[in-house]
């Protein structure tokens, strides 16, 4: 089997792994937000949550929109999940620690996602200033650790364990 044949035969599973991890992590994350912030902690409507995501792009006009703005917020959410999953996928083979302890690396990656979003991305795009409050920060970080970090870690490590077996 030639190197190009091996690369070609691994491209489709790599792409489907990234999309599957994005679908799982993105869905768990948005469901966590909708359930926890919608019903448990803050009683915010699903529409307001999705429009809040869209407002990073549209500003306050997002809250005047309807279903289209909600869908835009959902699309932005999945694009962000795709970006973080893809980053993890591509750094995985270069950081052996990520494969040694999938749970710990997933938890740490979720914490990394929280940090990048709250300390870097959201302030840079002018969505919100970073203000640290213990309870809301821990709550949000835990959601990302369990909804994005751990599933991404397990799905990606499964792909690479198959690649190593080839």
Image (spheres, rainbow, N blue to C red):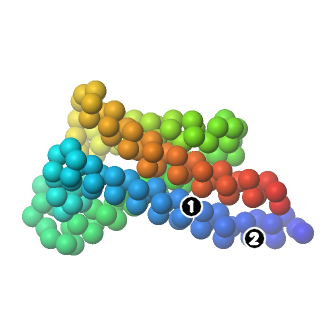
Q: In the depicted view, which residue is nearer to us: 24 or 78?
A: 24
Name the residue: 74% across, 70% down: 8
- First along the sequence among labels 2 and 1: 2
Rendering coords of residue 1 (x, y %): 90, 69
Residue denoted by label 1 = 18
Q: Quadrant of residue 91?
A: top right
Kindly state the secondary structure of the residue where label 1 is placed: helix
**89 shown above or below 47:** above
Rendering coords of residue 154 (x, y %): 60, 51
Kindly state the secondary structure of the residue where label 2 is placed: helix
Residue denoted by label 2 = 9
Rendering coords of residue 58 (x, y %): 20, 59
Instruction: Report, in whole angstroms, how far the alpha carbon at label 2 lies from the one at label 1.
Output: 15 Å
Quarter of the rendering occupied by the C terminus: bottom right
Judge the density around disc 2: few (<14), some (14-19), many (≥20) Cα neighbours within 10 Å. few
Name the residue: 27% across, 62% down: 73
**109 shown above or below 74:** above
Name the residue: 69% across, 46% down: 93
Q: In the depicted view, which residue is nearer to us: 111 or 83?
A: 111
Rendering coords of residue 64 (x, y %): 9, 64
Q: How many marks?
A: 2
- Which residue is outermost to the front? 40
Would residue 65 be found to the left or right of residue 53 on screen? left
Query: Can residue 163 be seen?
Result: yes
Name the residue: 82% across, 57% down: 165
Please tell me the numbered disc located at residue 51: none
- Which residue is outermost to the right? 1
């Amino acid at each position: 089997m030639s190197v190009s044949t091996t690369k070609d035969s691994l491209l489709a599973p790599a792409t489907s792994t990234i999309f599957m991890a994005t679908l799982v992590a993105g869905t768990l994350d948005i469901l966590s937000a909708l359930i926890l912030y919608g019903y448990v902690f803050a009683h915010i409507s699903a529409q307001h949550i999705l429009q809040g995501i869209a407002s990073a792009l549209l500003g306050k006009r997002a809250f005047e929109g309807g279903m289209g703005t909600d869908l835009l917020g959902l699309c932005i959410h999945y694009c962000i999940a795709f970006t973080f999953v893809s980053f993890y996928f591509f750094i995985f083979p270069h950081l052996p620690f990520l494969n040694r302890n999938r749970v710990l690396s997933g938890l740490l990656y979720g914490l990394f996602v929280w940090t990048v979003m709250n300390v870097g991305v959201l302030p840079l795009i002018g969505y919100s200033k970073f203000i640290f409050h213990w309870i809301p920060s821990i709550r949000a970080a835990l959601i990302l650790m369990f909804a994005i970090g751990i599933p991404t870690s397990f799905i990606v490590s499964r792909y690479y364990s198959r690649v190593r077996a080839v």
